[in-house]
Amino acid sequence: MAAFDDDLETRFDAAFVNVPGPLSWIARDSSKPGSEGECWVAHATGDWSRQHLEHDFDELAKALVPALCEHIDVDPSR
């Protein structure tokens, strides 16, 4: 899950990712009723997850956060 300080203006709340890369599905968790803040859930593909199962959390975040940001058209520094 990635959290952002400001609301994001995206064209969708959830999507299957059908292009090469680590992600298979992304969703705006904050689109649920009663949610606060801007949070997105990113699910990695099964193959990617198996290859990176034992990796450090920070290493995983360095790969997955930019991939998520690319699909929702947001600068990863946010």
Image (tube, rainbow, N blue to C red):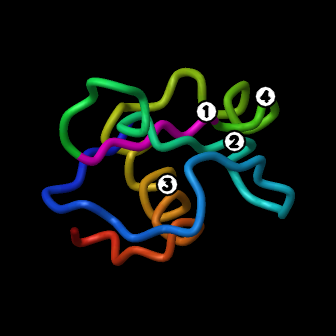
Residue type for callout 3: Ala
Q: Classify residue 43 as left or right of residue 46.
A: left
Residue type for callout 4: Gly
Residue 41: x and y in percent read 48, 36
Q: Classify residue 40 as left or right of residue 38.
A: right
Residue 41 among those drawn in magenta: yes
Q: Please give the range of residues in magenta.
A: 38-43
Residue type for callout 1: His
Check if mark 1's residue and mark 2's residue have beta carbons within 8 Å: no
Seen from the viewer's position, the closer of residues 64 and 8 is 8
Q: State the residue position of label 2.
A: 25
Question: Which is in the foreground here, disc 1 or disc 2?
Answer: 2
Which mark is on residue 52? 1
Decide: is 74 above or below 66: below
Residue type for callout 2: Trp
Q: Which one is earlier in the sequence, the residue at label 1 or at label 2?
A: 2
Q: In which quarter of the image is residue 78?
A: bottom left
